[in-house]
Image (cartoon, rainbow, N blue to C red):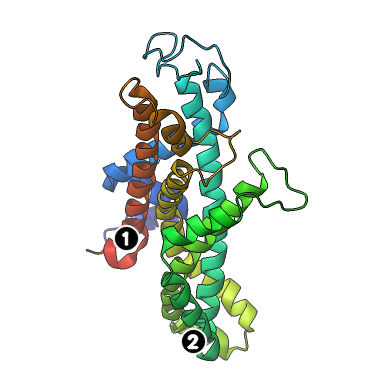
Amino acid sequence: MAESAALNLPGLAAPSRRLPFFVDVLRRLVREKPLGLVGAILVVMFLIMAIAAPLIAPYGDAQLGAGRRLAGPSASNIFGTDNLGRDVFSRVVYGARVSMTIGFLAIFTSTLIAVTIGVLSGYFGGAIDILAQRLVDAFMAFPALVFLIAVGGMFMDARIPGLPAQGLFSTRIVILIISLGLLFGVGSSRIIRGATLTVKSSTYVEAARATGATHARLIFVHVLPNVMAPVITLATLGLGGVILAEAGLAFLGLSVPPDQVTWGGMLRSEGRSFMVQAPWLAIFPGLALSLAVFGFNMLGDALRDLLDPRLRTQ
């Protein structure tokens, strides 16, 4: 009774329950960032498409005889068919699986590289920082497209023991994932370094250091959790760039093995050859690629605004 009376007294309010971090971000995304919400819906749609491809696609990605050759969009083949009679809708759906797999694994690799270089460089400073930043400068001076084409050309026929020559996790795809992760990770490490320098000089880190906390404890308990906001933003924005880069390499014939279907590969093999005769072969893979990149970019921009305290107050 006393507690309830106290809560009803003028000037006193019941303490509000704080929402979990991700729930709060989702709530603010829905209320404040309509374009970010559209991007999130597109991202979820493509993720469902990639995970449930066999359930969504009416035909296999390489199944012949799905309809007559070069048939336009119809009730039986909503995206039409290609020059071999394969269903374009099914190939677009299966292409999402390959593109999303490469994108997420490459971003996971790039995040590990960016966090490792950025946190160690920013936290320890001195010779480690100077050496790391000079290596980053040297790598960033090399044109990104030239780097990807060079890696793709040199290792196109390479074989890594234990990895298959064909399939989603073949040697060629693993090398592609590593090269994309290295390219995006090294560039992102500078942003993580800047965030680490800010956190490192904060009062609570200095207090923890004064109590005798080890470097490992300071990094994993105090620094890493407080640089997660830029990490999440960079990863989301980077996914669109990785998917677009993979599509560009696939268009040049330097991406996945021939047995794997990707949006860029569809644009190269069918879309370019039949641009005038069957424009749907280029329109639908290109539309899927554009929507995926748009979705990740809009979601990444919204998360940057929601997670960055400086932008949040503007």
User: Foreground residue, 267 or 30?
Assistant: 267
Q: Is residue 185 left or right of residue 169?
A: left
Q: Is residue 45 left or right of residue 110?
A: left
Residue 204: which numbered mark, if any?
none
Q: CA distance from mark 2 to mark 1?
A: 54 Å
Q: Position of residue 251 (x, y in %)?
A: 44, 41
Q: How many residues crowd mark 2 within 10 Å: few (<14), some (14–19), many (20+)? A: few
Disc 1 residue type? Leu
- Against 46, residue 183 (above or below) is below
Q: Position of residue 35 (x, y in %)?
A: 28, 43
Q: How many residues crowd mark 1 within 10 Å: few (<14), some (14–19), many (20+)? A: few
Disc 2 residue type? Ile
Q: Position of residue 272 (x, y in %)?
A: 38, 32
Which residue is label 2 attached to? 130
Which residue is label 1 attached to? 12
User: Foreground residue, 3 or 108?
Assistant: 108
Q: Is residue 149 visible?
A: yes
- Against 279, residue 291 (above or below) is below
How many numbered circles does the render carry?
2
- Against 281, residue 134 (above or below) is below
User: Foreground residue, 181 or 220?
Assistant: 181
Residue at (37, 46) in percent of width and height? 27
Q: Secondary structure at mark 1?
A: loop
Q: Is residue 214 left or right of residue 307?
A: right
- Against 211, residue 50 (above or below) is above
* Mark 2 or 1: the one toward you: 2
Residue at (41, 15) in percent of width and height? 70
Residue at (51, 54) in percent of width and height? 107
| Residue lying furthest left | 314
Q: Earlier in the sequence, mark 2 or mark 1?
A: 1
